[in-house]
Image: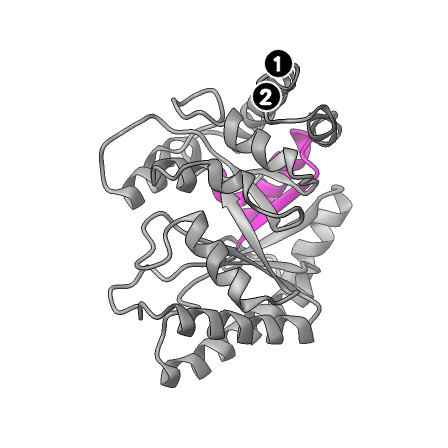
Amino acid sequence: MATVSLGGGLEEKIDAIAAAGFDGIELLDADLRESAMSPGECARRCADLGLTIDLYQPFRRAEGVSHDEFGAVQGRFRRELEVMREIGADSILVVSNTDDDADSSRDLSVAQLAALGDVAAEHGVTVMFEALAWGTHISRVADAWEVLQRADHPNLTLVVDTFHLIARGEDIGILSELPAGSVGFLQLADAPLLSMDLMQWSRGHRCFPGEGQMDLLAPIGTVLASGYDGPLSLEIFNPGYRERDPHEVARAGAVALGEFIDELGTQANTPSSTCTDDGVQRLSAQVGSL
């Protein structure tokens, strides 16, 4: 579960996620900065509770910037990698540029992400690249995958977030075209179907699977069918959730995730399903303690 999903301080969020039975977190950089805990203390707290830090996020304005600015981008990136060393995380979420001045050149984005991949490799870190639905020039899974294919770097991999995929109206057929091993991280969020600004929709109305109106079974099943065996993470931006007791919200998330996996298993047994029993078994093992 992503720490952004819960209210309260970071220590309370970590405690709530562990108590609900999750085995890992996505750590929001702002949660860490605002915490009284040092990065080392955060790492120890997670370890004591049996939690891994599976993703540190987000790193913004990473690509599509001028050549003059990119040196500063690399400096920021190296500082974040130092924080990651202290918390013991080896994956960082890099999101597509959403600023008005983002350069549309794919060649530039490819070169800049490849350069960040080189820096990541020096530190033994993987860059997880995600297309935000409101990205200026990279706003779809297909866009992000094109850049990653062209960059062709072993330390760069793809993030699939169900909200961005569905909210953007992208054909999930793109997921069935991805080679095995191309998805490095899978984020799960539901939402009511609304007609509004994409960022406001994402930041204010995400919810747990089964609480919204999005078809989550098809995209998750398709990614699992490719052999994906990484984390399935609840990343829920919702002010209403953050106003509630974090333990209550984390427990509700665990229940919703377990019910979603059960439904996915039922779907896997239908003749037309793109999912596989093996994929569901892998996820069931992840959520077995929830």
Image quarter hosting the C terminus: top right
Instruction: Please name the residue that numbered disc 2 is placed on.
Output: 273
Q: Is residue 207 left or right of residue 104?
A: right
| Magenta span includes 268 | no
Label 1 secondary element: loop
Magenta residues (range): 3-29
Residue 117 in the image: x percent, y percent? 59, 70
Q: Please tell me in which quadrant of the rendered image residue 281 appears.
A: top right
Q: Quick check: 235 above or below 179?
A: above
Q: Residue at x 42, y 72 (%)?
A: 107
Residue 265 in the image: x percent, y percent? 65, 18
Residue 217 in the image: x percent, y percent? 53, 25
Q: Is residue 272 left or right of residue 130?
A: right
| Magenta span includes 6 | yes
Q: Quick check: 187 above or below 114?
A: above
Q: Amino acid at mark 1?
A: Thr
Mark sitting on residue 153 = none
Q: Residue at x 57, y 33 (%)?
A: 222
Q: Is residue 149 left or right of residue 121?
A: left
Instruction: Please name the residue that numbered disc 1 is placed on.
Output: 270
Q: Do residues under tags 1 and 2 come within 8 Å of each other at their CB atoms?
A: yes
Q: Is residue 8 visible?
A: no
